[in-house]
Image (spheres, rainbow, N blue to C red):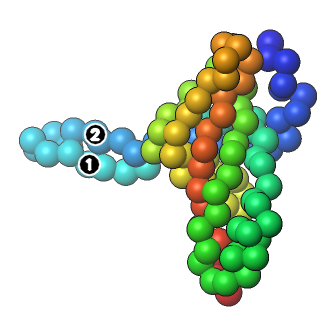
Amino acid sequence: MSRINHLLNAAVEVWRFTRVPDGMGGYSESWAQVGSARARFSQPTARERQVADKEEARLTHVAYLSAGADVRRSDELRTADRTYEVLAVFEPSMPGTYLRADCHSEQPGA
């Protein structure tokens, strides 16, 4: 069991863009939920909070996940009110501790 699980305070759904054969030689592409995970999101920086006062600002976030979470680059982490696109996933210098996912989200317009 990871030493950080008690700090993961958000439930997220993990969505992945998939291609499925359509039976006629082509593919059907769509987002599919591939799992769920517990996460903790960092707060936006002061500069980002200031920019977020404008419509549709782009915010960066760091999501911390348990070590066994199946999260990859280009996945989406979805909560009840926001979608985070995963830009990169890193494992810290001590393997098996946690995963760090650098993400971004769009600030909804007014």
Residue drawn at x 61%, y 74% is 57
Q: Residue furthest left?
A: 25
Q: Whole-percent x and y of residue 87?
A: 51, 46
- CB under 8 Å between discs 2 and 1: yes
Outermost residue toward the bottom? 110
Q: Quick one: 92 or 81, which is closer to the camera?
A: 92
Task: Tell me if residue 70 can be seen.
Answer: yes
Alpha carbon of mark 2 to alpha carbon of mark 1: how far? 5 Å
Name the residue beneath numbered marker 1.
Answer: 28
Looking at this rendering, what residue extends furthest in the front direction? 47
Residue 89 in which image quadrant: top right
Q: Dot 1: what SS?
A: strand
Q: Earlier in the sequence, mark 2 or mark 1?
A: 2
Q: Which residue type carries mark 1?
A: Ser
> Percent from the top left, x then y, of residue 30?
37, 51
Left or right of 31? Residue 37 is right
Residue under numbered circle 2: 20
- Which residue: 67% across, 84% down? 54
Dot 2 crowding, Cα within 10 Å, few <14, some 14–19, many 20+: few
Label 2 sits on a secondary structure element that is: strand
Image quadrant containing the C terminus: bottom right
Q: In which quadrant of the rendered view does residue 98 lie?
A: top right
